[in-house]
Amino acid sequence: MNPIFGDVFTEIAVLLLLAAIIGAIGVRLRQPLIVAFIVVGILVGPSLLGWVSADDQVDLLAKLGIALLLFVVGLKLDLHIIRTMGPVALAAGLGQVLFTSFVGYFIAAALGMDPVTALYVAVALTFSSTIIIVKLLSDKREVDALHGRIAIGFLIVQDIVVVLVMIGLTALGEAEDATTLGREALAVVAKGGIFIAVIGLLMRYALTPLLHQLARSPELLVLFAIAWAVALGATGAHLGFSKEVGAFLAGISLASTPYREVIGARLVSLRDFLLLFFFIDLGAGLDLSVIGAQVTPAVILSLFVLIGNPLIVMIILGVMGYRKRTGFLAGLTVAQISEFSLILGALGLSMGHIDRDTMGLITLVGLITISASTYMILYSHWLYERLAPWLNLFERRRPWREAGKQEETGTGYDVLLFGLGRFGTGIARELRKRGYRVLGIDFDPDLLRRREKIGLDVRYGDAEDPEFLATLPLEGSRWVVSSLRESSINRTLLHGLHSLGYSGQITVTAHTPTEAKQLKQAGTDRVLIPYADAAAEAVDTLFGREKCSPTAPNRPPEAERGG
């Protein structure tokens, strides 16, 4: 930071305000915030306003953001998706990576780049943004569609590949010459094996019991997760890996615990906030005086990503027996480069393998492809309807993998039940007796363990956390029921479900008829008032529904009982 405003705090405040304004404009244009933040960096960088230059504070915040990004990716690394999708995730993921790297290298070489620079550019072109794709698919409610599951499967494969590439580049950077490269590679493998073994032992014997104790305080649980991510990131760097690899392994170490969803959900906002500084720093590093010479190669490489990546995915899925529609919709999800491409470029820049012009080229390709692919994915069905007649080449005569079945969107639960106290557990038991499939959600780990022992399907989570709500199987459920009696929590839950477009029935719990009416106005379908409902049911049991005395006062209206 330059001392234009007098002190660093004021400069950060102005920078955040500007990021919020340009971010709001980007959202109105339906662009990911990554694009808006890079634009902020260009605006405040040396080429224009000159507010941001190399700075320890910004660099530290950017490094923390990258560590948390890799940690959350590792935390959400669901290998079950790869297994359930069979070979398609590996085939599409590895096939696209190999094709893009191979062809991209020759395109970069043809543009006059030296071999090392061409290799970096080619590898940077291969990775697609898991964050952007999952967000767009979630907004369109297509995560559980067949093409959504395939896309997430091969994005996971890409995430694993990018970590392996970072390990390899780190070994390459430490090698002084070709003679020592093999020795450095063996050293990295040995140290990596020991590192992973220690983490595995901690996963097996220590982490889950520790998290169970920490989960009594949600704030402490999140604090430990951040400390764990940064600590393993620092350990990885000291062992000769990068901090990104260490943070990624930290995420994987917690991915098998029952607290992965709530940790990931609570860290998303912090991760995005810290990554703001990384993308601003990238934008500030763009030299607009030389960007004119990079426009032509950036457009050529962007067209290759926007067209070539979807084509190879369509070819692979077509050969594997999927319909052209599935291949097209899944293929569009790889029509951009990702934040990992920018991180990879930054790693190469720090090791002296590429210069700032090459980093600027990669960033420019990112701006073009992310902006264009966002609209391609948002309007994917419209594009498919117009291109379908020309896509028959990518479909077998009999697409046997999809023959005779529709895309599955079911998730296996009729009711999502928040709160597993006595009232909530009683509801769950009664629903199960009547044949309904119930998923119980609660914030108390001890309570969850006890309910799991009686055969309930349970998940640890917070009804007030909108990011956590997005991880639930909402599409396949017919009801969401809250047995929680705090009115503020139920209001937040209602708002979160409505913002996610939940179309099923919502039932919440209240203390009084007044609260019930307020919750009705907030948009719930039905309100339970436990004591009033129980009293009315007791009277009905004692005297029967048709045996009220003509002189008895009128019974409370149905709306007051939970209407």
Image: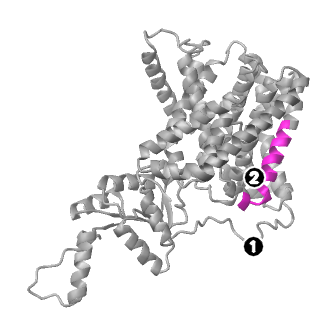
Return the x and y of residue 424 as percentages of the image width and height. 38, 68
| Residue 170 counted in the magenta span | no
Within-10-Å neighbours for mark 2: few <14, some 14–19, many 20+: many
Name the kind of residue labelled 2 in the image.
Answer: Phe
- Quadrant in the rendering for residue 70: top right
State which region is magenta.
Answer: 83-101
Q: Earlier in the sequence, mark 2 or mark 1?
A: 2
Name the kind of residue labelled 1 in the image.
Answer: Gly
Quick check: can you spot residue 137? no
Name the foreground residue: 277 vs 367.
Answer: 277
Colouring chosen for the image of the structure? one colour
Q: Residue at x 30, y 56 (%)?
A: 486
Secondary structure mainly formed by the magenta segment: helix
Q: Quadrant of the C terminus?
A: bottom left
Numbered label attached to residue 429: none
- Quadrant in the rendering for residue 165: top right
Q: Residue at x 49, y 76 (%)?
A: 436
Q: Residue at x 76, y 28 (%)?
A: 170
Per the image, the residue denoted by label 2 is: 328
Per the image, the residue denoted by label 1 is: 404
Return the x and y of residue 18 as percentages of the image width and height. 48, 24
Of helix, strand and loop, which one carries label 2?
helix
Left or right of 141: which side holds 401?
A: right
**Above or below for 348 versus 562:** above
State the CA–CA distance, disc 2 to disc 1. Answer: 20 Å
